[in-house]
């Protein structure tokens, strides 16, 4: 009997039909974004698996970029887990070095802003989970450095407000 070689085995043979609630990040087409001050790639695991009340994605932050503008949420709780690479988390007026295995929770309504940035030479991948605004939950995202806020009511109606 030969030695089992998992690398030689297809993990999802063509004959295997997986339920729609199962997805592999390598089978999802990422959405890229590149706007002034922010850039990255995001794989929407929540949509791929049919999640409705939580958003789940893997975001890759390229070297020298921020994942988002500095912001806080009124009603959206978030959780982050560093999968690979290194990055920095700006949390209020502090900055924290993060590496694979680090986890961060951001309770809603604290008013303390956060932002991930990657000053390193390699990309950083972070899993991001959060309550889905617009699915019975309202949220206001405050962008203090932009002088704007984004609101979404419980039904999903959106509005950007100048502060």
Image: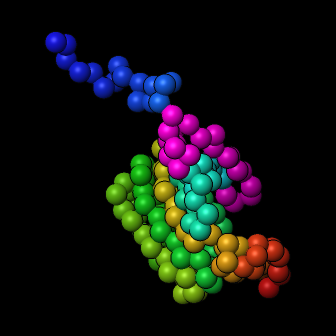
Q: Is residue 76 visible?
A: yes
Asked where in the image residue 151 lies, by quadrant, the reply is: bottom right
Residue under the image location 67 percent in, 78 percent down: 136
Residue under the image location 53 percent in, 50 percent down: 21
Q: In the figure, is residue 39 to the left or right of 131?
A: right
Q: In the figure, is residue 77 to the left or right of 134?
A: left
Q: In the figure, is residue 32 to the left or right of 161?
A: left
**Image quarter hosting the N terminus:** top left
Q: Is residue 123 visible?
A: no
Residue under the image location 67 percent in, 46 percent down: 31
Q: Determine the residue located farthest toward the top in the rendered image.
A: 1
Asked where in the image residue 162 lies, by quadrant, the reply is: bottom right
The image shows residue 138, relative to residue 24, as above or below, that is below
Residue under the image location 72 percent in, 79 percent down: 154
Q: In the figure, is residue 147 to the left or right of 72?
A: right
Residue 108 % position (x, y): 55, 82
Tell me the colour scheme of the image. Answer: rainbow
- Magenta span contains residue 21: yes
In-front residue for pair 98/75: 75
Give the magenta-colored segment's residue range: 17-38
Residue 16 % position (x, y): 47, 30
Residue 88 % position (x, y): 47, 63
Residue 163 % position (x, y): 80, 85
In-front residue for pair 27/79: 27
């Amino acid at each position: 009997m030969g030695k089992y070689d998992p690398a030689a085995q297809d993990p999802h043979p063509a004959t295997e039909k997986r339920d729609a609630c199962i997805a592999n990040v390598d089978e999802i087409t990422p959405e890229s974004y590149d706007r002034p001050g922010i850039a990255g790639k995001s794989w929407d695991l929540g949509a791929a698996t049919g999640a409705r009340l939580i958003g789940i994605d893997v975001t890759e932050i390229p070297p020298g970029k921020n994942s988002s503008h500095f912001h806080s949420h009124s009603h959206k709780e978030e959780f982050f887990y560093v999968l690979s690479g290194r990055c920095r988390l700006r949390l209020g007026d502090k900055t924290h070095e993060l590496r694979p295995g680090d986890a961060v929770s951001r309770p809603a309504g604290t008013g303390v802003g956060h932002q991930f940035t990657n000053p390193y030479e390699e990309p950083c991948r972070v899993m991001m989970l959060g309550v889905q605004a617009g699915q019975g939950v309202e949220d206001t995202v405050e962008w203090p450095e932009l002088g704007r806020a984004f609101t979404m009511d419980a039904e999903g109606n959106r509005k950007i407000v100048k502060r």
